């Protein structure tokens, strides 16, 4: 079972914003990732905008990939 919770670290104690469900008394593995409190939802995609502008022929490559995705594919037979 995997849950993603947010909280604040105080020494050896982590104060969670919500109670973890169905884990009372069980051992868990904790992976700490520092959160940027100033980041708003969607800010990451805005920071990555323009990341491929230096790539030569990127527009042609993207157009080719879009064309490949739209192409007709063979219909698969249902598995019995």
Image (cartoon, helix red, strand yellow):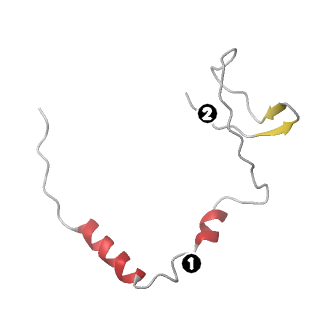
35 up-or-down from 61: above or below: above
Residue 71, image x, y percentages = 21, 68
N-term-proximal mark, 2 vs 1: 2
67 up-or-down from 57: above or below: above
Residue that extends furthest to the top in the rendered view of this protein: 25
Q: Is residue 49 left or right of residue 10?
A: left
Q: Residue at x 71, y 46 (%)?
A: 33
Task: Return the residue nearer the eye: 25 or 18.
Answer: 25
Q: Quadrant of residue 79?
A: top left
Task: Return the residue nearer the eye: 7 or 27.
Answer: 27
Q: Residue at x 47, y 81 (%)?
A: 55
Query: In the rendered structure, are the residues bearing label 2 and label 1 in contact, judged by CB atoms less than 8 Å apart?
Result: no
Q: Quadrant of residue 30?
A: top right
Which type of secondary structure does the marked residue at label 1 adopt? loop
Residue that extends furthest to the right in the rendered view of this protein: 11
Q: Residue 3 bears which disc, if any?
A: 2
Q: Is residue 48 left or right of residue 24?
A: left
Task: Return the residue nearer the eye: 80 or 48.
Answer: 48
Q: Residues within 10 Å of mark 2 (few under 14, many from 20)?
A: few
Real-space Cα separation, disc 2 to disc 1, in angstroms: 33 Å
Residue 51, image x, y percentages = 56, 75
Q: Residue 32 bears which disc, if any?
A: none
Q: How many marks?
A: 2
Viewport quadrant of the N terminus: top right
Q: Is residue 9 left or right of residue 32?
A: right
Q: Which residue is mark 1?
A: 50
Viewport quadrant of the C terminus: top left
Which type of secondary structure does the marked residue at label 2 adopt? loop
Q: Residues within 10 Å of mark 1 (few under 14, many from 20)?
A: few
Q: Quadrant of residue 9?
A: top right
Q: Residue at x 62, y 70 (%)?
A: 46
Residue 53, image x, y percentages = 52, 82
């Amino acid at each position: 079972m995997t849950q993603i919770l947010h909280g604040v670290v105080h020494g050896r104690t982590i104060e969670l914003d919500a109670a973890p469900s169905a884990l009372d008394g069980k051992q868990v593995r904790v992976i700490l990732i520092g959160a940027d409190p100033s980041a708003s939802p969607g800010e990451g995609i805005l920071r990555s905008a323009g990341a491929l502008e230096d790539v030569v022929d990127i527009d042609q490559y993207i157009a080719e990939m879009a064309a490949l995705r739209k192409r007709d594919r063979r219909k698969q037979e249902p598995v019995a």
